[in-house]
Structures are given as structure tokens and as C-alpha cells.
Amino acid sequence: MITIEAPGTTLTVRAAIDRVDRTLERTAETTPAGVLVVLGDGGWAPASLGLSFRVASTTGADAAAERNAALAIVTKATAVHVGDRVTYVAGVQTVTVRHRGVWWEFNVTFAPRALTAGNQGTGEFLTIAGVPVTLDGIPVSWEL
Amino acid sequence: MSTPLGHVSLWAGASLVGTLTQARLGDLSLTSDLLAFRAPFGAKWHHAALQQLPTLQQVSGIASSATLSAIQAALPNVTRLGIGAWRMPVMGAAGPVTIVPVLQGHRITAQYVVDVAAPWEADP
């Protein structure tokens, strides 16, 4: 089960597809003279997190209310929980909702803030004299 | 008055513009302009400009020859799509509109601008 978290609410789904797409910033080309040229530093470009799931209703035939509730949560998502793993997301990049008769098919792509626990924010951690500033144990970050 | 199964009704305000038969909802496509990028030779990811862009709902259905011209004329002003027991608020059709003659009339495929935050209304 996957839980999508938005401010003040959550949506738990049984996802059919849960995938992370990553890209390395490195390309290779060959010049006309046959020289191999490698460009890029080999760092990880920002990833995307894709979810695909169905929304149906046990009480209504059209599941319209459930569809609208799911869409509202997905578009305001701040985190995706898979088991014990939490991926904080900066927001949603694309959503496709397809009507399938009595249920709705959602395909959602999120932009994760990070894939590692070390840096969940997008900015620099705030420090005073080299000591991290925390709020209730959470490091405070800032961004220009 | 709910819209029959397989139909989509088009409303401009409180006026029924026309009804598409053998209709189906296409994809609702929502795209944000959220940019994710990494500074050159940096490791951190940055994100910018989260502003939801207009969402488009595709609808395809058959209009009878008698109602075709009225539906075409009203497409930019459609404010509600009637689906089953619901009316979905829209802000008119947008972009390409495809009209293909078929045996029963003309199949119209159009996409409508949707505000995803606007609640659906129960059919009165």
C-alpha cells in the first residue's frame, strides 16, 4: 500500500505501478575524427516518481466523489509513503485521469525533493557556528 | 435530470446546448510547470515555479446533424459538462476540435479547460 500525503489529509492506494525514473548527467559523443567525447559530470539529475492506481467506490456507481477527492489530494501532495520509506515531493508534474466505466485510472508523476534521507529539502541546511539548527529534531534548511 | 449513460450533455449557463451520444470522457490531463534541476557540478536538486497550469478534459461524442451547428457555435461558451448525475464545471472548449461524419451524425472530439479545484455539481 502506498500513502500519498497532502496537508491535513492522506490517500492510501494499492498502486499498480510504482516507479522511479532517474537520469545521469553524462552523454557520450564521437567527433567526426573518431574521438570519444564525454560530457557532463555524472551526477544524478532530479528524479521523477510515477504512480499508477485505480479509484473506485463501494457505495456509488460512478465513484465521482472518490475521483475528485483523490485528484485534490494528488495535486497538493507533499510526501509519498511506501512502507517505512518516505519520499518528500516538491509537487506533482503530471496527472492523467482516465474514465474506465465504474472506476478511474490515475497516472501521476511527482517530483521528489530527494531520494536519500540526508537531504529532503532543496536548500542548504542552516547552521550556527557549524552546528545544525533543528526544530523538533528536523534540520532547518533555507533556499535563495 | 441526469444525463443518460453513454451521453454527455453540454451546458452554457443554465441552457442545454446539446447532447452528445455514444460519448466518452477522454483523458483528463493536468500538467504543472514545476521545474526540477540540478546546478552544474552540484548535487542538490532544486525546484521552481509550482503554478498549476490549466487542465484539459477531452470529450468525444456524436452530435446529430440537426444540432451540429448549434453545438459548434456554443463550444467556446460551454460552462458545464453533464455526466451521469453530475455537472462538471468547465471554462469552454480549447484547442483543436475534430469533427468526423459518421452514420448517426458527426463525431465531435474537443477538449475543455477544467478547474480541478471547482467542485462537481449534482444534477438538479
Image (cartoon, coloured by chain):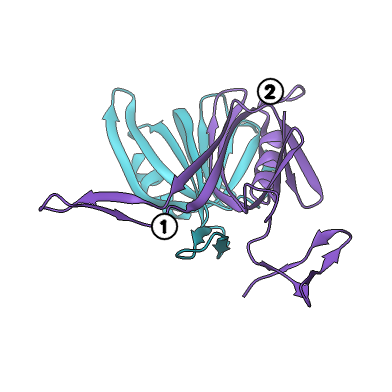
Residue A65's spot in the image, x, y percent? 71, 36
Compared with residue B124, is residue A24 higher up or lower down, i.e. above or below?
below
x 45%, y 37%: residue = B59
Q: Secondary structure at mark 2?
A: loop
Query: Which lettered chain is shown in purple?
Result: A
Please tell me how crowded label 2 is: few (under 14), some (14-19), or many (20+) other residues with Cα within 10 Å.
Answer: few
- Residue closest to the eye, A23 or B114: A23
Q: Position of residue A13 (x, y in %)?
A: 70, 30
Residue A41 has which mark? 1
Residue B58, above or below A61: below
How far apart marks 1 and 2 lie (CA) works out to 53 Å
**Chain B: drawing colour:** cyan
Q: Residue at x 32, y 34 (%)?
A: B65
Q: Nearer the viewer, mark 1 or mark 2?
A: 1
**Badge 2 amino acid:** Ala
The residue indicated by pointer 2 is A61
